[in-house]
Amino acid sequence: MNKTISNILIQEQVVLEKIYHIRDQKVMLDIDLAVLYEVETRALKQAVKRNIQRFPDDFMFQLTKEEWQQVITICDNLPKSAKFSPSTPFVFTEQGVAMLSSILNSERAISVNIQVIRIFARLRNMVADNTQLRLEIEKIKNKLENQDKNMEIVFQYLDELLEQKEPTPKTRTRIGFKPDTIS
């Protein structure tokens, strides 16, 4: 591998902070990707527009003004210039980020893309692990609920048994020697 490509490392935390959850998808803003690729946002958008057929809706979409306002209010790590941009940003899903490497031909873009894709894959694995963990917890909860129900039934039966009156013994006539009576 080329030494310059392998020397370009971006901290994982930096990339993780730039992944947002919009329209039920994990995405990255064009502004953040431009910074990572060390290109102007305008140049990145132009390259995407020239190759728009490579970016279907599940790879990239443009935020509405309302969505952009929500992102601005929620995120305090956006560049100040981005907040006042007249156009709303493009956001790229994992596949869209991968596609960017085919239209940006710099060594930096290739290296950054490899790192970003690896981070997306790690996130996906973490979500899958969490899903498996949640399923296991749900199984345990169901078992506990069933045990609670069974214990409740047992206690109900015990209460019913305690509430039943013990049969009163009938007065019996004594048999045999009767010291009380005079013969």
Image (cartoon, grey):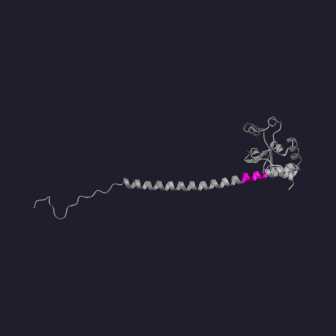
Work out whether residue 55 can be spotted: no
Residue 29 lies, in percent from the top left, at 79, 43
Work out whether residue 119 can be spotted: yes
Residues in magenta? Answer: 116-124
Which corner quadrant of the image does residue 68 belong to?
Answer: top right
User: Residue at the spot x=52%, y=56% of the render?
Assistant: 146
Judged left or right of residue 68, residue 137 is left
Judged left or right of residue 135, residue 56 is right
| Residue farthest to the left, as pictured | 183
Quadrant in which the C terminus is drawn = bottom left
Judged left or right of residue 108, residue 25 is left
Which corner quadrant of the image does residue 45 belong to?
Answer: top right
Q: Is residue 123 magenta?
A: yes
| Residue farthest to the bottom, as pictured | 176
47 vs 163, nearest the viewer: 47
Number of callouts: 0
5 vs 36, nearest the viewer: 5
User: Residue at the spot x=74%, y=48% of the render?
Assistant: 25
Q: Is residue 137 magenta?
A: no
Quadrant in which the N terminus is drawn = bottom right
Residue 152 lies, in percent from the top left, at 47, 53
Residue 99 lies, in percent from the top left, at 83, 51
User: Residue at the spot x=55%, y=56% of the render?
Assistant: 143
Magenta segment main secondary structure? helix
